[in-house]
Image (cartoon, rainbow, N blue to C red):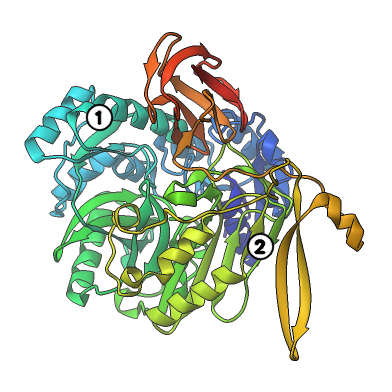
């Protein structure tokens, strides 16, 4: 058995691995950036080593720093989590070259399946059909245009060495190809350290169904069941569940067999996920994630298996003591990702900041995997996942209602989160009936009236208001009333006023500027591209620059037409919420 595991990751997944290691009597080593010095995963681990730097590239993507931490700590194994180096062949080989166990598949399998292009070829060789697309890296946007004109628009540009929707852009016409190609490359390089991309057909109304596999080093490969991950925005999953609703068992069996074929074709072992698109009774191979998935807990709850524990056992050379016929699935599980994003108006703007309150849900069938506690800061430099709320119940409808109850119990203050959007999704008749697809959230779910407030509002005179809860009894019934009271009036009723906090503006995937002509960003981030110069004429809604925050690119748009008189930023500049980037007169 392994003795000491270094977790080359951060946040929720690092905490998740640490907990299972502790239950198994395995020592844990955390690594951290300067911004994560006091993070939860650092506090929970037996040992912790500094990587230096703030950005992912300076810390969690710094191979030499991680290798030094392995040497200094004496760790005999490394768990990569997901994201960062989890699907990086060079990193896996660097680990094994030091005689340290890599808790994941062999580097050769990552090389084949971690590269989405070669994985398409491997699946085809195994007799599993994929989504129509090019099986070689793009070299220019002209190739995107050629593909779109042949197969029809829209098409999808995708990162070859990543997953989770990062570095993926949907292109609706030839005019969008160049900008989308450039943006996809930037995101892929930022998140995965490589910028190769490919193009494939974008299906009209598919469901995203993935199959969890588990394989040991003794030749045993099993499929554990499917997960439906169709509720997405920007190709980022919001809600996942197992089993999939309205999913024929004959398709389930065929998809499971296909997942095993793909896995065995590349000599895969450890935990992995084979992803498919499902539409009109047919399924197509999409990609294989050669790592643990964010949504693995829903499989754990319906199978009763601890996937992290089995990752560790397989890495230590143990053989699976059960076969395919022994895998049982019971009940229904759902997972909601709680992200630091403001879903107001359906725009999902990154919302970094300090979480001042985190009241966690509990009760029957409720599990919360969190990477933060109240008082912790969610940085603009990393992924925006705060926690995963997971429930189990005897059937889908009970699980849906249980999730709504658990979401209602979850209280987060100081930052905006996706909880209000998740509540809308779970309560919608389409979701209740299982009639959704990967495009449903963005094309059918109406969030235009959704407004999320994370700080104290300010009145017309600019005075901060304070939220006060009053309790009264009416005919013996307790009633709680919440009121926003001007700060100057709080002392009159003997209540101490809290520290002032500015009102966070509701934002979105595009960051609107002020109508005065001073175009300001609404969040902390890094300018990756400036699209205007002094003297340019701009229209309302025109993008003037692109801001990266929490690994997502956001367009900063003008809300006033006119002439650009000043450009205050350049590519690479860091900005804070409220900073003016362009002036239009």
Q: Quadrant of the N terminus?
A: bottom right
Which-is-in-front pick, marks 1 and 2? 1
Q: Is residue 403 left or right of residue 469?
A: left
Image point (44%, 34%), residue name: 553
Let me know if residue 221 appears in the view. Answer: yes
Inter-mark Cα distance, 1 to 2: 50 Å
Q: Is residue 472 left or right of residue 74?
A: right
Tell me if mark 1 has few (under 14), some (14-19) or many (20+) residues whose alpha carbon lies within 10 angstroms of its own: some
Report x, y in % for residue 430. Answer: 31, 69
The mark nearer the N terminus, 1 or 2, is: 2
Q: Is residue 557 above or below residue 486?
A: above
Residue under label 2, please give it: 22
Let me know if residue 303 appears in the view. Answer: no
Residue furthest toward the bottom? 476
Residue furthest toward the top? 535
Report x, y in % for residue 516. Answer: 54, 26
Tell me if mark 2 has few (under 14), some (14-19) or many (20+) residues whose alpha carbon lies within 10 angstroms of its own: some
Disc 1 vs disc 2: Cβ atoms closer than 8 Å? no
Q: Is residue 421 above or below residue 140?
A: below
Instruction: Give me the disc on residue 458.
Output: none
Report x, y in % for residue 350. Answer: 53, 42
Report x, y in % for residue 337. Answer: 49, 58
Image point (36%, 80%), residue name: 328
Circle 1: element type: helix
Residue under label 1, please give it: 176
Image point (54%, 21%), residue name: 581
Circle 2: element type: helix
- Front in this rendered view, residue 224 or 197: 197
Image point (20%, 32%), residue name: 136
């Amino acid at each position: 058995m392994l003795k000491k595991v270094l977790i080359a990751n951060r946040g929720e997944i690092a905490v998740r691995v640490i907990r299972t290691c502790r239950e198994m009597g395995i020592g844990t080593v955390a690594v951290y950036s300067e911004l994560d010095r006091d993070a939860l995963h650092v506090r929970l681990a037996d040992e912790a080593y500094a990587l230096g730097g703030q950005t992912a590239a300076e810390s969690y993507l710094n191979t030499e720093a991680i290798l030094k931490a392995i040497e200094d700590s004496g760790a005999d194994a490394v768990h990569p989590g997901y994201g960062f180096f989890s699907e990086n062949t060079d990193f896996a080989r660097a680990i094994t070259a030091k005689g340290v166990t890599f808790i994941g598949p062999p580097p050769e399998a990552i090389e084949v399946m971690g590269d989405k292009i070669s994985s398409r070829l491997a699946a085809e060789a195994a007799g599993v059909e994929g989504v129509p697309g090019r099986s070689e890296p793009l070299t220019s946007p002209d190739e995107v245009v050629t593909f779109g004109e042949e197969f029809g628009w829209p098409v999808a540009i995708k990162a070859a060495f990543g997953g989770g929707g990062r570095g993926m852009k949907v292109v609706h016409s030839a005019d969008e190809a160049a900008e989308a190609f450039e943006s996809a490359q930037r995101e892929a390089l930022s998140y995965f350290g490589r910028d190769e991309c490919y193009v494939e057909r974008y299906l009209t109304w598919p469901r995203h169904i993935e199959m969890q596999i588990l394989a040991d080093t003794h030749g045993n490969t099993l499929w554990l069941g499917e997960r439906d991950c169709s509720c997405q925005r920007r190709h980022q999953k919001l809600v996942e569940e197992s089993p999939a609703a309205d999913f024929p068992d004959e398709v389930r069996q065929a998809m499971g067999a296909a997942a095993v074929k793909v896995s065995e074709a590349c000599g895969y072992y450890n935990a992995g996920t084979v992803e498919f698109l499902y539409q009109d009774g047919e399924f197509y191979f999409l990609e294989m994630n050669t790592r643990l998935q964010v949504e693995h807990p829903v499989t754990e709850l319906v199978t009763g298996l601890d996937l992290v524990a089995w990752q560790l056992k397989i890495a230590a050379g143990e053989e699976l003591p059960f076969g395919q016929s022994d895998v049982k699935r019971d009940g229904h599980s759902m997972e909601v990702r709680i992200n630091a994003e403001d879903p107001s108006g359906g725009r999902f703007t990154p919302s970094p900041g300090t979480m001042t309150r985190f009241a966690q849900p509990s009760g029957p069938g409720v599990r919360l995997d969190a990477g933060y506690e109240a008082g912790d800061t969610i940085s603009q430099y990393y992924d925006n996942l705060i926690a995963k709320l997971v429930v189990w119940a005897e059937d889908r409808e009970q699980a849906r209602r249980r999730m709504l109850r658990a979401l209602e119990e979850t209280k987060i203050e100081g930052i905006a989160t996706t909880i209000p959007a998740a509540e809308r999704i779970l309560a919608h008749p389409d979701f209740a009936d299982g009639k959704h697809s990967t495009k449903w959230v963005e094309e059918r779910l109406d969030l235009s009236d959704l407004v999320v407030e994370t700080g104290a509002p300010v009145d017309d005179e600019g005075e901060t208001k304070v939220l006060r809860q009053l309790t009264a009894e009416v005919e013996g019934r307790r009633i709680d009333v919440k009121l926003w009271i001007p700060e100057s009036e709080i002392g009159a009723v003997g209540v101490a006023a809290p520290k002032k906090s500015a009102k966070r503006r509701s934002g979105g995937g595009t960051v609107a500027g002020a109508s005065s002509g001073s175009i300001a960003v609404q969040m902390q981030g890094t300018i990756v591209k400036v699209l205007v110069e002094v003297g340019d004429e701009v229209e309302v809604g025109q993008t003037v620059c692109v801001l990266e925050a929490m690994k997502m690119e956001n367009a900063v748009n003008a809300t006033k037409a006119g002439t650009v008189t000043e450009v205050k930023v350049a590519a690479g500049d860091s900005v804070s919420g409220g900073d003016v980037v362009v002036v239009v007169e």
